[in-house]
Image (cartoon, grey):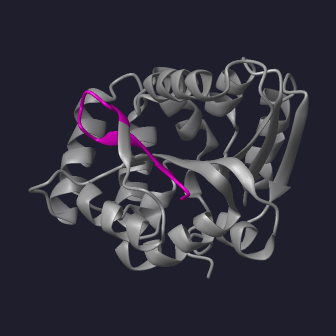
Amino acid sequence: MNAENSQNFELFTKSWKAYQAIIEHDYLWHSMAATALNQWLSEQFGTDILFSFVDLACGDSSTTAGVLQNFRNVNYTGVDSSSQALNEASRNTSQITHQTLVESDYLDFLATGEEKYDVIYIGLAAHHLGLENLDQFFNLIRNRLNPGGAFIAYETFLLPDETLDEHKKRLSLIIRYFWSAMSLAYRQTVVEHVAMNDRPVLIADWNEKVTNAGLTLTQVLMKSPDRLCSMVISASK
């Protein structure tokens, strides 16, 4: 059930500074993701409509908290298995009026609770699951969404003609040669994390799994310039 726990989110527990450097230098395009998320939420809810938002594998919540501070009536729940990440998240979400932080593996959180939500969000964590675990994940998502609720994911995906090994080599080259503001040691830590943990899929395979679970076909909200990441959205029927 716990697909991530064996690695225990190395970037949060062993190399927190490397994770912070990725955010600081925007190497995984968090600013673009935040802009896309803010635009969609604004169009959907405005600034006054009450809605619930779950942030799976929230980390320090810095990206989502920065967005959700613009919405007065959001009920925010951040879920992460790392207590260190949640300590940071408690500070970053302090300006959100209604917020709850839960220390849990996100699959366990989805499987054991009953409350339903308007928006379920995951950022750069579902690509650790691998294709064989997406059926279970999407079924859990469907069961926790309100009617018409949205599932939004910001994830790395394979290019249409790319194998997993090719993706890892491409990402590793980007990290080594273009993430130059990070120390060599931090870059090596991230390259090792990618080699051990990353299992992104094709968007076509993601679509097949998400529609099999009873959600709508995904819409792409944004793509990163380096073609590593996309923000996709599906809805409950």
Tell me the quarter of the picture where residue 137 sits.
bottom right
For the point 40% across and 29% down, which residue is it?
Answer: 27
The single residue placed furthest to the left in the displayed view is 161
Q: Where residue 68 sits: x, y (%)? A: 71, 26
Q: Where residue 40 sits: x, y (%)? A: 53, 28
In the depicted structure, whether residue 88 falls above or below residue 192: above
Q: Where residue 70 sits: x, y (%)? A: 72, 17
In the depicted structure, whether residue 46 falls above or below residue 132: above
Tell me the quarter of the picture where residue 174 sits.
top left
Of residue 210 and residue 178, the one placed in the foreground of this image is 210
Of residue 1 and residue 148, the one placed in the foreground of this image is 148
For the point 58% across and 75% down, which residue is it?
Answer: 6
For the point 66% across and 58% down, which residue is it?
Answer: 145
Rendered-image quadrant of the N terminus: bottom right
The single residue placed furthest to the right in the displayed view is 97
Tell me where the magenta segment starts and ends, as one range. Answer: 221-237
Tell me the quarter of the picture where residue 163 sits.
bottom left
Please give the count of numbered marks on the rendered protein.
Answer: 0
Q: On the picture, is 225 further left or further right than 45?
A: left
Q: Where residue 20 sits: x, y (%)? A: 59, 33
Of residue 11 and residue 159, the one placed in the foreground of this image is 159
Q: On the picture, is 88 further left or further right than 58?
A: right
Rendered-image quadrant of the C terminus: bottom right
Residue 87 falls within the magenta-colored stretch: no
